[in-house]
Amino acid sequence: MSISRRSFLGKGAMAAGSFYIVPRHVLGKGYQAPSDKLNIAGVGINGKGLSDVNNAFNEGVNNIVALCDVDLTRAKPLFEKYAKAGQYQDWRVMLEKDKSIDAVTISTPDHNHAAIAMAAMQLGKHVYVQKPMSHNIFEARTMTEAARKYQVVSQMGNQGASSPGTQQIVKWIDQGLIGKVHTVNIWTNRPIWPQGIPVPTGQHAKPADIDWDVWLGPASLIDYNPAYHPFKWRGWWNFGTGALGDMGCHLIDGPFRALGLGYPTEVEASIGSVFISGNQPEYIPEGCPPSASIQLKFPASKKNKSAVTMNWTDGGLRGFHPDLIPANDPIGTADNSNGVVMIGSKGVLTHATYGLEPRIYLNNGDKIEMPKQEPNNLKEYGHQAMWAEACKAGFNSKEHKELSSSFDYAGPLSETVLMGNLAIRSYTLRTPIQGQANRFNYPGRKKLIWDGQNMKITNFEDANQFVKREYRAGWKL
């Protein structure tokens, strides 16, 4: 009888004929059997990928067996740290050649998340995917269903979901301290990269150490341009998901989780304009706007029992102080640059990024605070390490069910975030007014009604083109 190593990872040590794993205590104190370690591969290993791989490795609790990055120069720090790991520039080659991989961390630009994760899940590999889970709503739904179908352990990289602050927020809401919540205001200072600018032009020589075709993946074919890589891709719809995609899964997570929200039913957007010459705003549908205001509406949930209006602003814009919060008290972060305010019938709850610094101001004048936490530390609240342990325990394990952002939760959260981007892109759609030069109608500048179950806008058909993308030949899911 032949039993693969993977059959033990997720099912625990078990007898199988005469083949079994020797318990750790038999081998001596402190000894970790090789079979107790998860074999991890990392795709996209610079930037956020550095901490994702390192924290999943967990100081040697697990193995890093393969590393992949399209940019070999930026990959050097981890290539050198994990010198025994296989080194790849194309994740497809990595998945084909290395049969020892149990799980994959995916920390690439947004547009590649789904393609890599789907390929890994179809091979039975557990996945950790950076936020947002995907580039569009269709991909998020597809990935959520695939994790269940292939019974793999999943986690999205919104590490604040595992923070003590987020846990405290949920407890306070469950205790009914601020009553039924009816309004949530969320804001961020993002973008902190070029956004709302004209499409880059000019010809640029591609560095020899970058595989541009793999970097593009399913995105539309365009020439290499340093205006996109690294990091600045976030501001272009072909690759990124803008300010909302960057911070939405961090900031919306608190109220979404605590209030038990599901798919929104309505969304409406308004965006900032850019004037470069003349008195007409630039029209840049390829790019995310410099600032945006989004309103999402949710029906009452089993937890909150009140309809909720969620207001999102970015580009440094934020809502104003609720009356209950003293004028000199910050809302959100200490500098007010990012934050969340939940307004309920008995008071308000505010917190910073990653669920940090949660505070309650009650109608009776009382204030409740959680002891100060350390900001986002290098261990990231154990978010990656807990995922790795859940991978070893298996899909149906208690460990997987207790993960703070498995796809069953992260899928609907990501869809909510990406719904805001659908509204932004609908807002820019225009048709020329016949007989009037440079005059246009903007039919998408209205409240959009969303059928979450069927992933469809019901009152503006043109908006549905943004539910999914057109995939480049050879890169379909």
Image: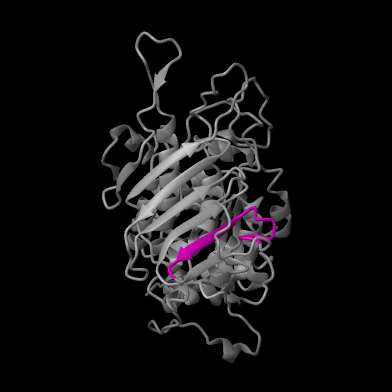
Would residue 8 be found to the left or right of residue 74 on screen? left
- Residue found at the far top of this picture: 435
Q: Identify the image's colour scheme: rainbow, by chain, secondary structure or one colour.
A: one colour
Tell which of 231 and 117 is nearer to you. Answer: 231
Residue 42: image location, x then y, percent: 58, 56
Range drawn in magenta: 330-345
Residue at 41% of width from left, 40% of height from top?
A: 423
Task: Quadrant for residue 163, please give it.
Answer: bottom right
- From this viewpoint, is residue 8 visible? no
Q: Quadrant of the C terminus?
A: top left
On screen, residue 13 above or below 218? below
Magenta includes 333? yes
Would residue 67 be found to the left or right of residue 140 on screen? right
Residue at 63% of width from left, 64% of height from top?
A: 326
Would residue 290 be found to the left or right of residue 458 on screen? right
Tell which of 245 and 6 is nearer to you. Answer: 245
Residue 53: image location, x then y, percent: 62, 60
Magenta includes 278? no
Q: Quadrant of the N terminus?
A: bottom left
Chief secondary structure of the magenta portion: loop
